[in-house]
Image: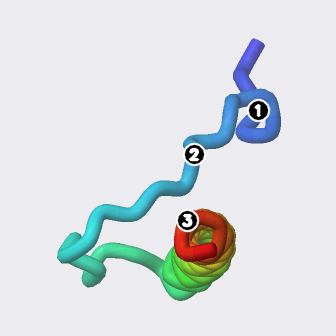
Amino acid sequence: MPVEDDDRPRKKISHEIGQDLSLLAVEELTERITLLKSEIDRLQEAATRKRASKDTANSFFKS
């Protein structure tokens, strides 16, 4: 009985900075762009939370 492509687990999309992109299809590039944009959003949210926490601590100790 042949194994169907749909039955195989999907490979997790990952990206390495500086990776050779010449062998990737347009769809793969688009998936990576989406992945990296969501990661940028996540990083910006974390930075915002840390900045707010730092500002709160600074205002507490300056009072």
Q: Mark 2 is on which residue type?
A: Lys
Q: Disc number at residue 41?
A: none
Task: From the image, tell me which residue sits under label 2.
Answer: 12
Neighbour tally class for label 1: few under 14, some 14-19, many 20 plus, Cα within 10 Å: few
| Residue linked to disc 1 | 4
Does residue 7 appear left or right of residue 46 in this picture? right
Say above or below: 26 vs 54.
below
What residue is shown at x 57% (from left), y 42% (from top)? 11
What amino acid is at disc 1?
Glu
Q: Residue at x 29, y 80 (%)?
A: 21
Q: x, y percentage for residue 59? A: 63, 76
The spot of residue 8 in percent (x, y) is: 70, 30
Q: Position of residue 16 (x, y in %)?
A: 30, 63
- Of badges 2 and 3, nearer the viewer stands 3
Residue lying at the far front in this picture: please name it.
63
Q: Which residue is mark 3?
A: 61
Identity of the amino acid at label 3?
Phe
Image coordinates for residue 35, horizontal then vertical, percent: 60, 70
Position of the C terminus, as image quadrant, is bottom right
Q: Is residue 34 above or below residue 11?
A: below
Density class for disc 2 (Cα within 10 Å; few <14, some 14-19, many ≥20) is few
Residues 11 and 5: in front is 11
